[in-house]
Image (spheres, helix red, strand yellow):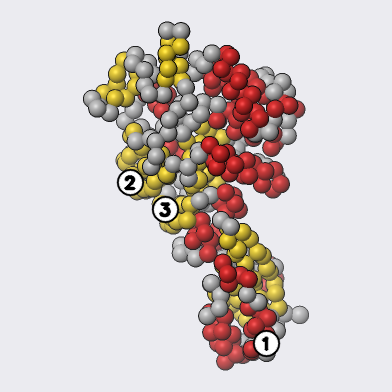
Amino acid sequence: MSCCMDWWDPETAAFAENIPCSDCVRVEGDFVLRRPSIPGGAVVRVGNVSKSFGRVTALKDVTFEVQRGEILGIIGRSGAGKSTLIRCLNGLEKPGRGRVEILGQDIVPLPERRLQLVRQRIGMIFQHFNLLSAKTVAENVALPLKIAGVPWRERDFRVQDLLALVGLSDKASVYPSKLSGGQKQRVGIARALAAEPALLLCDEATSALDPETTSSILALLRDINRRLGLTIVLITHEMNVVRTVADRVIVLDQGRIVEEGDVWRVFTAPEADLTQRLIGGQTNELPSAIRSGLRNEWRRGTDLVLRLQLSGSAAENPVLAQLTRDLEVLPVVLDASVQRVQDHALASFTVAFRDPGEPLARRIGEYLASRVSRLEVLGYVQQLA
């Protein structure tokens, strides 16, 4: 099978018949896929895409780009439109309106036969692995190459390289039933890379894995991205996944993009209410007894509860110690964490102040507002024991 029995000629704006494209070489009278060249600039361009199912709007005026070598995380709650969007990117769904360009070609008007050629440049990783149980690890990885008509010698070398890349060289003859969940996902990653795609789509690729295995898979994806310069789009509902591996993030809500930007910027200064909730900017970490007892107004005998966020160099300053020294108050730490986001420190504290009274509460707020990256007044709660 040739990869270019028909291919798009941008000069004539038509499909040429039986002419080798720039990604093919002639081997024994046929054209076979060689290592594809990936152009610079945007690998994906989505322009004003909308998609409805009956009266339900899944996507509404979605516009974004993904640059070569970038990892983009797309996050949102269940029903936000994430799965519909990824199906539009690989041509499994056609939007009602808008453009979806892969490597400069709008795939929306293409018939299925033409889409199959585009999909050779797109790798997919799924939540539930989708491995063939009757085939070995090596046979699962080789399947896309076999379908593409790659000669068996070339397939064999390619499979060996891929299994080494994902750390499964010793599992080539093993069947999927003998693998752990993390190993199965590594096979899925190797299979997705078999045809040397320009774009890798990950649909909740770590949702079925435990935290330790998730970390190893994310590290593998990041390593592949850096070594191969592969463009990756991650669909997930886990903010931790985005924080760990993505360069940029898009937040979807009811089919619309409500926030977009560098991961570091979005995590340190989220603008949309949904983003703040997904990051944990409300009261998710508080014990239920405190969370349910929070009130908006101070009353005598209640404690002030604040959430502080410090980023970059500010995260290295002893802000709470300075507060204790300067205002002679003793904050009670209810929750604390220090994370790394794109090699930057991000510290978060939830603290309570015992019955401060309105004047002191105001002084505490003014003092902290000038020293932290972000300050939230979560409310007042009946005095803590």
> Could you tell me which residue is drawn at 42 percent across and 13 percent down?
26
Disc 2 target residue: 48
> Could you tell me which residue is drawn at 46 percent across and 20 percent down?
33
Q: Nearer the viewer, residue 192 or 40?
A: 40
- The label on residue 257 is 3
Does label 3 or label 1 sit earlier along the sequence? 3
Mark 3–mark 2 CB contact (< 8 Å): no
Does label 3 or label 2 sit earlier along the sequence? 2
Mark 3–mark 1 CB contact (< 8 Å): no
> Where residue 354 sits: x, y (%)?
68, 84
**Quadrant where the N terminus lies?**
top left
Label 2, residues with CA under 10 Å away: few <14, some 14-19, many ≥20:
some
Q: Which residue ends up furthest to the bottom in the rendered image? A: 359
Amino acid at the residue labelled 2: Asn
Amino acid at the residue labelled 1: Arg
Local secondary structure at mark 3: strand
Q: Which residue ends up furthest to the left in the rendered image? A: 12
> Could you tell me which residue is drawn at 24 percent across and 27 percent down?
11
Disc 1 target residue: 325
* Separation of residues labelled 3 and 1 (CA atoms): 44 Å
